[in-house]
Image (cartoon, rainbow, N blue to C red):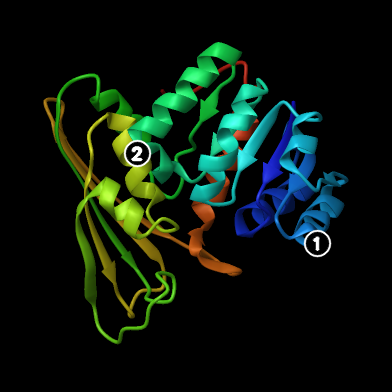
Amino acid sequence: MKVGILGCGAITNIITDFALKEDLDVDLRCFYDQDLKKAESMASKVGGTATSSVEDMLDQVDLVVEAASPQAVVELAPKILEEGKDIVVMSVGTLLDSELKNRLEEIALITNSRIYTPSGAIVGLDGLKAASMGEISKVSLVTRKSPESLGISVNKETILYEGKASAAVRKFPMNMNVAGVLSIACGKEAHVKIIADPTVEHNIHEVRVTGDFGEFKTTTKNRNCTTNPKTSILAAYSVIKLLKSLNDAAKIGT
């Protein structure tokens, strides 16, 4: 499978570093970024090519990994799907916009393309998806991050937001993809609390789910990317695992 990557920041850097060490089972063919030099740098690592437009990329790939921004999903995902190409959406929070999500799904059905959303920076999504076959009564997320990763400066623990996932994504579009993937996975909007904590060294996500299956709670303490404290290494690993799994003859989990 020939893969293009849209956005050449921290996540793409981890993906290309992995591809240099191990077989990714796909061909990292094309790279696009608004900063062409970044795209050229990433492409040179794995023998790919940098493109000056997404349209040029689509002629050369089967699947596009969006690792750019929520705006990139809004503007470019429809074009990618209209060309019959599959897409991996990292900016999952955008899909809480039901109008956009429905539009993308309609295009995918017409063009026989697929929309993938990796698990990102949390664990337990397989269990959540299984639990959603019954009735989910409550999904909550408490996210605790350093002020730096949230783009603010405070010297004590501060609650920045508490409420619905959709509003959290709008308020913190580059930090709340976890809230998006949780809500989409179970079909119920998560209740979210965001805490800036100057004492933490990791991005911490505590998830609690209650339903007719029972109850579970997970805690994920993520190491941040050195080049971007907003990005967790696990989020990049989830894309790598998704790409590798596309060619698996046998699959484990939902």
Q: Earlier in the sequence, mark 1 or mark 2?
A: 1
User: x, y (%) of residue 225?
Assistant: 56, 64
Q: Nearer the viewer, residue 238 or 173?
A: 173
Q: Position of residue 103 (x, y in %)?
A: 45, 26
Whether 26 is drawn above or below 196: the answer is above
Q: Which residue is mark 2?
A: 96
Q: Are marks 1 and 2 in contact (CB under 8 Å)?
A: no
Residue with the mark numbered 1: 37
- Hey, what amino acid is under mark 2? Leu
Residue 102 placement: quadrant:
top left
Q: Is residue 208 above or below residue 114?
A: below
Q: Does residue 254 sit above or below 8 in this rendering? A: above
Q: Amino acid at mark 1?
A: Lys
Residue occupying the far bottom of the picture = 155
- Residue under the point 73% across and 48% down: 32
| Quarter of the image with the N terminus in it | top right
Mark 1 element type: helix
Secondary structure of the residue carrying numbered label 2: helix
Q: Position of residue 65 (x, y in %)?
A: 63, 39
Q: In the rendered view of the protein, which quadrant contains the C terminus?
A: top left
Q: Is residue 112 visible?
A: no
- Residue 180: x %, y % from top left: 35, 43
Local crowd at mark 1 within 10 Å, few (<14), some, or many (≥20)?
A: few
Looking at this view, is 101 or 235 the one in front?
Answer: 101
Q: How many marks?
A: 2
13 left or right of 108?
right
Residue 41 shown left or right of residue 244 in the figure: right
40 over 253 or under it: above or below: below
